[in-house]
Image (cartoon, rainbow, N blue to C red):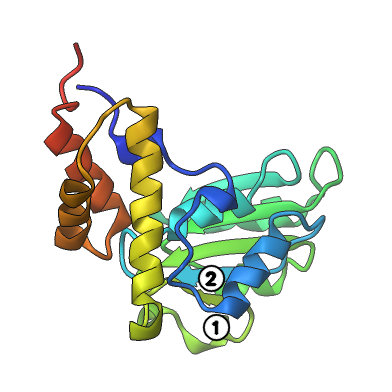
Amino acid sequence: MSAMWSERHRPKLLSECVLEHLDDYSRNFLQEAVTASQLINVLLHGPPGTGKSTIARILCDKDRFSVNSFNGSLFEKSDVDKLQGMVATCSVYLNQRCILIDEQALRAVIEGASDCAWICTANELRKVIPPLLSRIILIDCSYATLQRREAHFAGIMRRCREILAAESVKITEAELRHVVELNYPDVRQTINALQFRSGNLIAA
């Protein structure tokens, strides 16, 4: 099978992301963060398909930081021990260490690692303990408010047009709108649905 479009066309730049569902403060913060020489602790939260992991990867730029990534849903005690050893030492190139934890965050290790930036994602904010929330900047990637829905919808349409052009696939604007409406607001599922409709699921 060919690669899924949602992975093949995962944004590498913040400008490629659909951010219209975020509030102005969050968008401005992210735009400043992607060029900053130092990061602060960030937790991106919201339902699946809203861009949390993509934004987290962009923030953790390996050209600027020493990045270590973990899948929080598979965390074990050995991983905690590994993290504690990691944050106790400087990176090889003496640049800031950035720890990316997808779907999980660890309060005790964060407290003892002032020289590290922690970039975390979580589907449900209610599952993150309050002591951790007070030690991290929250970016709400939840579904757009009614006031932002039209702009968010237009942002998803824009991103889909870019992907269709890159794949040399042509569909009508009406067809595209129909697919986005059926899958809104899940961007990843929208892109997967477009690939399914285009017939580009099976490698030649």
Is residue 56 in view? yes
Which is nearer the N-term, disc 2 or disc 1?
Answer: 2
Q: Provide the residue designation for mark 2.
A: 43
> What amino acid is found at the position of numbered circle 1 in the picture?
Leu
At a point 16% along the width and 47% down the height, the residue shown is 175
**For the residues marked 2 and 1, what is the alpha-carbon distance in whole angstroms?**
8 Å
Residue 127 versus residue 3: which sits nearer the camera?
3
Q: Provide the residue designation for mark 1.
A: 133
The mark closer to the camera, 2 or 1, is: 2
Q: Are marks 2 and 1 in contact (CB under 8 Å)?
A: yes
Farthest residue, direction top: 204
Report the side of 115 relative to 34 (left or right): right
Q: Which class describes the residues within 10 Å of circle 2: few (<14), some (14-19), or many (20+)?
A: many
Q: Is mark 1 on a helix, strand or loop?
A: helix
At a point 64% along the width and 81% down the height, the residue shown is 135
Give how far across and how far down residue 173 sits, in percent: 23, 48
